[in-house]
Amino acid sequence: MTTHDQDLLVAIGRLEGKMDALIAITNAHNEMIQKHDERLRELETSRSALIGAVAILSTAISAAVAWLSANSV
């Protein structure tokens, strides 16, 4: 095996190591994105419930005010 062949094998080994590191980093980022997605989904769901509750409450208050206005005259 010539020196040139050995240099090529060393370079290929370095590339494999770098590719393994990139794959590990990508997997870590994918896990982090998945966790963020789950947290965001929970926040969106709770926000939707809160908006629904506020809508119901505001409708009830509006109806109560309208009823009191109509009965106080």
Image (tube, rainbow, N blue to C red):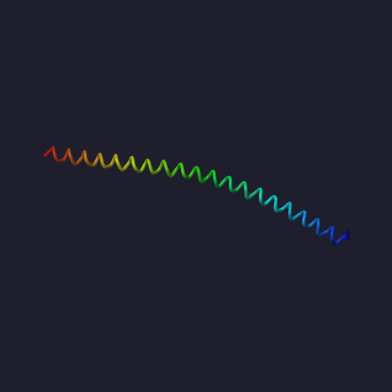
The residue under the point 69% across, 50% down is 21
Residue 35 lies in quadrant: top right
Q: Tally the numbered discs.
A: 0
The residue under the point 41% across, 41% down is 46
Residue 11 image point, x, y percent: 78, 57
- Would you say 44 lies left or right of 66 here? right
Of the 4 image quadrants, the one containing the C terminus is top left
Of the 4 image quadrants, the one containing the N terminus is bottom right
Residue most extreme to the front: 1
Q: Nearer the viewer, residue 7 or 54?
A: 7
Residue 64 image point, x, y percent: 21, 38
The residue under the point 28% across, 41% down is 58
Residue 38 image point, x, y percent: 50, 43
- Would you say 20 lies left or right of 48 here? right
Residue most extreme to the bottom: 4
- Would you say 23 lies left or right of 62 here? right
